[in-house]
Image: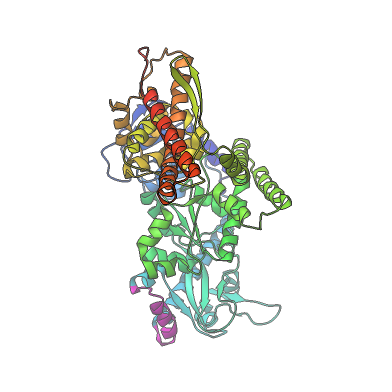
Amino acid sequence: MTLSPQWLDELRSRTTLSTLIGRTVKVQKAGREFKACCPFHNEKTPSFTINDEKGFYHCFGCGAHGDAIRWMTDQRGLGFMDAVKDLAAEVQMEVPAPDPRAAQRQEARATLHDVMAAAQDWFVTQFNGIEGTAARDYLKNRGISEKTVKEFGFGFAPDSRGRLKEALSVHGVDQLVEAGLLIKVDDRDPYDRFRGRLMIPIRDPRGRVIAFGGRILGDGEPKYLNSPDTPLFDKGRTLYNLDKASPASRQTGRILVVEGYMDAIALAQAGFEDVVAPLGTALTEHQIERIWKMVEAPILCFDGDNAGQKAAMRAALRALPILRPSHSLNFISLPAGQDPDDLIRSDGPQAFAELIGAPQMLGEKIWQVEFEAEALNTPESKAGLKKRLSDHARDIADHDIAQHYRQDFQERYENAFFAKRDNYSRQGQFQRSKSGSKSQYVSFKPMDDTKSVLIDGHDLRIAKAILGGLIRHPSQISKHFEELTILRLADSQMQALLSELIRAAMRKEMLDMQGLLTILEQTDCYNVAKGLLRADALNFIFNRKLPDTAPSELIERAQSDLAEAIKVITARPGLEAALAEATRRVQDNLDEESYAEQQRLRQAKQEFHERLVELTQIDDVV
């Protein structure tokens, strides 16, 4: 029978998901959604959300995600058609009558599945026999364990043009050709496609063999040979190891994408089971969409050489037109000359874990590749960079996302070519405008062009106050991205919280305090954030809980003071370093110029201190 996408959408829309799930799981109303303890893993605090409007469920704990049909197959254990029939009966929809032609196609596919299963068994038998010695030695030398060999079903194709055809003759030559196991050229006799190769089965999401990859063991080309496209196998839509990676990703909330299946196997053996690979082609739009159904931001792991970086850029550019809110790609680059297997062998799994723990975001990857594409030493080359970035943003179909990329690229461009000049021209300038007895605004500039600023000692207290202020005024995070991203806090908990605040603001532009706390509740930083909101020792106006009726002037002052505190703490380490250097020069060679510079910097440091004192003096009205 043929079930059209339109018919399936109608079935889903008629099914009330919370009612369906509520028959076996206790659910409770939570705003416009429902919550429950996840039935797919043990938990005491509900993290399983049901959205009737959108027709899906999602667990923030284990990553389980799906619609009404997926619920029936995964939780109830039904087959797809049984699930459809049960749901259709409940909402009084008639299941379409069988289509004879569709039935014939389904029968043909079922026969091909039998052929592929028989081929897999035969390849495994050859692998374990005398002729498979070289294949077994190759895997042993690569560090592939016997357990991994069995889990991934390695086999061996003898160097013969007719052994497989003869062994599977019961299935008929035509079926073997259609399955991609034999090659037929004109009127010549078909012959075995895979000869003298280590065989790697490629499976569909249900774990059925649908194709093979073969690696040559001696000299010759191509080194890797995949099955051709068949009724079972479309290499542009298939991902290697998806059958194992999909359930693993529910536990990790992550999907890793590597360049080839041997990379995927090596990572899985090292404990990274949530890994997939394309099959001899660049990552396609269909494959990206398939991965996005599991996670919103998969991590693409490419070799650090030129070919690997080109592959990463091709994937990035293919993703741009199909980007949608909250869905993107992240990237890591392996050390030059190393693939994942090399890195794990030399430095251990922890080295790879550290890399995937700090990936590049899509926009950063595109900027890096384009920025390093040519020497940017002429106005024309700089203009060329700007045009390439503009073209990439124009490729994004989603208007809002495209606008954010234009803004991001523009800021990076200006920082690369104009920010340094502005910083040097204003270096050491501290302008104060007085209104009454208190300073209303002070403009501080960093004393050098340092890319990161370490905050420790006494300044950590100020940093904590700033973090508390950002939680109370989340709209200010995006306004100070440049300053916040260069801060490195000596307190690891505070640094983790700062990173989460930046990440939340980048993902969601419009944030209020409660919305931000809801996001932080899913991280390890929630208790730290709540503690900063309760800290009585933070005496800045931006740390105070302002009444709902607070006048706009008071809110603006709190946000202005917060901005100023960020500028002060960003600039002060540079000032301290400059003062220490000036003092050293005075000690080495006391002259009028060096002494004047030291005194100027001492005065600037005093002004920093005085301004921080002023910022902590809260008016009675607060």
The single residue placed furthest to the bottom in the displayed view is 130
Answer with left or right where residue 78 lies relative to residue 189.
left
By secondary structure, the bulk of the magenta-drawn segment is best described as helix
Q: Residue at x 60, y 79 (%)?
A: 221
Residue 274 makes an appearance in the image: no
Magenta run includes residue 270: no
Residue situated in front as seen by the camera: 462 or 124? 462
Q: Count the labels in the image.
A: 0
Query: Residue 510's spot in the image, x, y percent?
Result: 50, 29
Answer with left or right where residue 12 lies relative to residue 454.
right
Q: Which residue is drawn at 44% across and 84% down?
A: 134
Residue situated in front as seen by the camera: 117 or 550? 550
Query: Residue 406's spot in the image, x, y percent?
Result: 63, 40
The single residue placed furthest to the front in the displayed view is 591
Up/down of 391 relative to 514, above or below: below
Q: Which picture quadrant has residue 602?
A: top left
Answer with left or right where residue 50 lies relative to residue 297.
left
State which quarter of the image contains the C terminus.
Answer: top left
Query: Residue 65's spot in the image, x, y percent?
Result: 42, 43
Up/down of 140 relative to 82, above or below: below
> Range of the magenta residues?
129-146
Q: Which residue is drawn at 47% across and 59% down?
A: 276
Magenta run includes residue 142: yes
Residue 587 makes an appearance in the image: yes
The single residue placed furthest to the right in the displayed view is 380
Up/down of 118 relative to 47, above or below: below
Query: Residue 67's spot in the image, x, y percent?
Result: 45, 41
Residue situated in front as seen by the camera: 283 or 527? 527
